[in-house]
Image (spheres, rainbow, N blue to C red):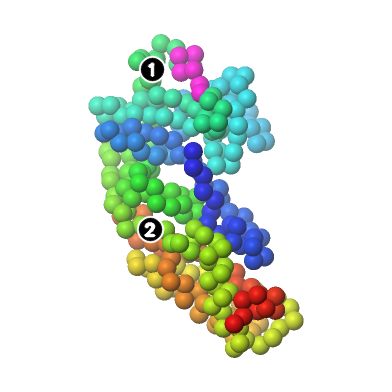
Amino acid sequence: MIRKKFILTKLLSLIGFVGAFATPQVSSILIYNGDTISVYLNSLPKEFYKTDIKFFESVLAVNVFGDKEVCWTTACGDGFLTMWEITENQLYLTGIYSCCYYEDSIKADLTLLFKEKVVNGKVKADWVTQKNVRGGKGFVLWNNDMQVFKQEFEFEFLDGKLLEVKTFDNSKSRESAYSKNEIKLVEFIYSNIEWSKLPIQKERIRVFVQFSANENGKIDEVEVVRKSDFEIFNQEAVRVIKSIPDWDVIYVKGQLYRHRFIMPIVFSEEQREKYGK
């Protein structure tokens, strides 16, 4: 089970910004046409949702796992993960697992939960009626709390029957060495600030910059969203962000998706002494 933190969280803490970010959600598994697809589908029959939810405790834990103590993480908000398969355009549930299954090996007993509805170890998922069920294979990167895949799928189900499936080519998506390595990014930014052209200041100056990249990974849209009182620092923040050699390229549903990142640039004498040339 792989969980990757939002790419800028640690970076922002390093340079003095405190903010809240969504936790990337781990996905369930769907077997379709011989492919293993990560899919956002955690739907169970309504009778499993009968216990009042408690703070930081899954509403489903006692109904699905009985008296077994399963883990709960913000990356697994439903309190469980599921495994599915599609056979002859019919959706089947084949397993319900703990969020930490690879550590605790806890899974639900489908026979106990579904009784005679279990046939050959799987249950016809006739309770699932849902459009725009997103899935994918060929993981590329996390974009905020969304996974970006080389091949993306969108399923539509009615009473467990597969009505339609759309596929999208996101193979042009790629992750930048700078976005996935906060130390490399910090080193680049502060080493490339032209400190000699900036006036000495007694207090820290923060400039918040919003930016996005084109299909070549070139940062070509930059905007100061929180300015300092000194225009020279605002302009330098924009210049140094634009100079980052490469950034994430994100495609969603086969189209370029320009996610806008926000990054604070901190100007201080401490940074000048450390990085100034």
Q: Is residue 125 above or below residue 171?
A: above
Question: Which quarter of the figure is the C terminus placed in?
Answer: bottom right
Q: Amino acid at mark 1?
A: Gly
Q: Secondary structure at mark 2?
A: loop
Residue 262 visible from this viewpoint: no
Q: Is residue 103 left or right of residue 177?
A: right
- Tell me the residue at 28%/26% (across/down): 87
Residue 62: image quadrant is: top right
Query: In the depicted view, which residue is nearer to us: 104 or 97?
Result: 104
Residue 86: image quadrant is: top left
Tell which residue pokes out farthest to the top in this image. 116
Q: Secondary structure at mark 1?
A: loop
Q: Which residues are drawn in magenta?
A: 107-112
Query: In the depicted view, which residue is nearer to us: 213 or 274?
Result: 274
> Which residue in the structure is indicated by mark 1?
121
Q: Earlier in the sequence, mark 2 or mark 1?
A: 1
> Which residue in the structure is indicated by mark 2?
174
- In the rendering, at what x and y percent does residue 239 appear? 50, 80
Query: In the depicted view, which residue is nearer to us: 83 or 270?
Result: 270
